Amino acid sequence: MGLSLPDSALSGGDSGHSDDVPRSGDFPRSAAVLARMRSENFPVAARILPHGLRRHLQALYGYFRLVDYAGDEAPGNRGALLDFLEIDLKRVYQGTARIPMLRALTPTVAECAIPFDVLVKLIDANRQDQRVRRYRSFPDLLDYCALSANPVGEAVLYVFGRAEPPLIALSDHVCSALQVLEHCQDVAEDFQQGRVYLPTDDMRRFGCQEPDLTGERASTRLRGLVKYEVDRARRMLDAGAPLVGQLSGMARVAVAGYVAGGRATAAAFAAAKHDPLRVDVRPGRRRTFAEWGRLYVLGGTW
């Protein structure tokens, strides 16, 4: 998913330097990145959470979106920019990061003991985006989600002190489902960037061609395919939802919100007749809050 930002959102510096020599000024300003939280399918850092937890979740979000910017939207040599990000992520663990948003990540990493190997997977996912533009099968796509999405949930569990293997496994279901839903929302945008995240095996099964991914409205074939992928994501959400019941306190509040956003997004697809070309599919606030309350009370099982 790209992070589209105007030039004025960049943090400054000489724009005439070589593309092969990235600098901290090549990245967006923190405020521009954090403003994107309002457009996500789920509440990233709900206001009900204590300030310290919100600060950690916002720091993680800033890092994740910064990596997406480097891999999806940045002009010039994106590979070099991702390499620079990895170098600065290593500096986070030494307390010497140069990029402002990675400096903001430093206390979160230290206080929550989030391993480097978890956070660097997001950079690896964006490197993969530079060379892999299509995924043949759904298992292939899930392998990509293991880099691009699942580490997000694992990092959140570290924030709440619950990064335990059984809970991480449940979180993986939720995060992969959220990623699949996002891919379904963004089929046209991704195609314009030369990427298709709908598995080619599934496209063939439904008789879809890549030109179906553009236009003012989705064909019957594409709507059938999108419904198939959304239903699949909904089942993954259901498989991961018991994670909510394994948590308590603020962790339960936050994670229930993430699952609720996914369920509300699936409902929005149904309301749009699974046509992401004609409709900007977004979860409704009322549906999100209703799902959030049910999940919190019932623990993800009903």
Image (cartoon, rainbow, N blue to C red):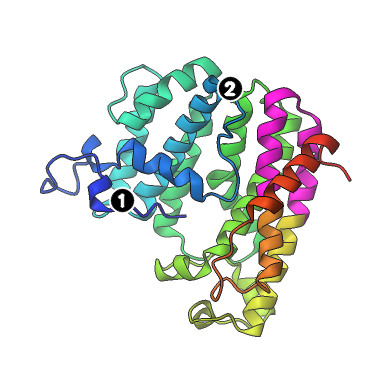
Rendered residue at 46%/60% (across/down): 132
Out of 81 and 139, give the one closest to the viewer. Answer: 81
Q: Which mark is residue 302?
A: none
Asked if residue 23 shows in the view, the reply is no
Q: Secondary structure at mark 2?
A: loop
Query: Residue 58: image x %, image y %?
Result: 48, 32
Instruction: Give how far across and how far down residue 6 sits, in percent.
Output: 28, 53
N-terminal of the two: label 1 or label 2? 2
Q: Residues within 10 Å of mark 2 (few under 14, many from 20)?
A: few
Residue under label 1, please give it: 78
Up-down relation of residue 226 to residue 167 (above or below): below
- Give the distance between the C-alpha atoms of the residues marked 1 and 2, in whole angstroms: 36 Å
Q: Residue 261, how many percent across, how many down?
A: 65, 48
The residue that appears at 64% across and 49% down in the rendered structure is 176
Mark 2, residue position: 50
Report whether 290 appears left or right of 298: left
Question: Per the image, is 244 magenta?
Answer: yes
- Residue 253 in sight from this viewpoint: yes
Dot 1 crowding, Cα within 10 Å, few <14, some 14–19, many 20+: many
**Do residues under tags 1 and 2 come within 8 Å of each other at their CB atoms?**
no
Q: Amino acid at mark 2?
A: Pro
Magenta span contains residue 300: no
